[in-house]
Amino acid sequence: ELSGLFCGMIGVIVFAIPALFGVLLGLVLRTSLKLSAWSQRFYLPLAAMIALPYAAAAVEALFPRPVETLTVRTRAVFDASRRNAYDSIIFYEEVKHRPPFLLRLALPRPVRSEGKKTAEGDVVRCVYERGYLKKRITRVEPGRLLVFEVIEQKLHFERDVQLIDGSLKIESGEASADGEQDAATAVLLTTRYRPRLHPRWLWESMERKIVHTLHGHVLEGMQRQAEDPPLGRL
């Protein structure tokens, strides 16, 4: 599929190109040192490269940055009524079709979700192959809005990112010719998180790409249900 090809190209850009750049830089450094008459060229550069991550961590510890909160939003338009769009709300762990390559590469595999998400205070336990998330519903406006907060995160990447909350908002659609239902409905998916990885200029674009891909996967699952609902929901 074209989506698989696109995700593969993104994977090459995100991972292969920086790796290739590192290899080329290493070859240039090695060649320069071999041609150099510097007496300490065999061990001092290697010691400096080993010490560099620890020095960077020490600098970050001495000059900590304020914890920032990032927001990522993704919007999609469904060929469905507002009611069907709202009734199709699902989390990542409930999406049935195969996730794209980037999500399989970056995130643990979702297994299932446990619990309801119909009323404020409901808690949903989202199970993964090696961990889980707990989401508490904090605001419900039937047919329009579902807001949740992440109350527990055990996914083995807590040192990389902390998930905070999110929402699914059903926006106004366009009326059909008969005026009885919406012919198209917009859905806005929002995620907020606190990043842990530095430097930010390197990681932020990667994080946003992964979150947007995750949003697209969830919205596609919702769209499939909204545009082809079970007979009982027609």
Image (tube, grey):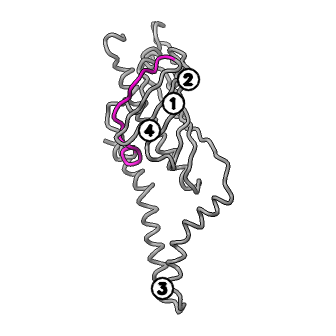
- Looking at the image, residue 223 sits to the left or right of residue 200; the answer is left
Decide which of 20, 190 is in the foreground and name it: 190
Mark 1 vs mark 3, CA separation in Å: 54 Å
Could you tell me the amino acid type at mark 3?
Answer: Phe
The residue carrying mark 3 is: 42
Q: Indicate the quadrant where residue 219 lies.
A: top left
Q: Is residue 223 above or below residue 55?
A: above
Contact (Cβ within 8 Å) of mark 4 with mark 2? no
Q: Is residue 6 visible?
A: no
Which residues lie in the magenta part?
Answer: 103-119
* CA separation in Å, label 3 and label 4: 46 Å
Q: Is residue 7 above or below residue 151?
A: below
Residue 90 percent coordinates (x, y): 42, 26
| Left or right: 51 as drawn, with respect to 114 | right
Disc 2 designates what residue?
Answer: 138
The reply to whether residue 156 is in sight is: yes
Mark 4 or mark 2, which is nearer to you?
Answer: 2
Name the secondary structure under disc 1.
Answer: strand
The amino acid type found where label 1 is placed reads: Leu
Question: Earlier along the polypeptide chain: callout 4 or callout 1?
Answer: 1
| The N terminus lies in quadrant | top left
Q: Which label was assigned to residue 214?
A: 4
Residue, disc 1: 189
In percent of width and height, residue 5 lies at 34, 47
Give the number of the mark in front: 1 or 3: 3
For image coordinates 43% across by 42% down, the residue present is: 155
Please give the label number shown on residue 8. Answer: none
Neighbor class of circle 1 (other Cα within 10 Å; few <14, some 14-19, many 20+) is many
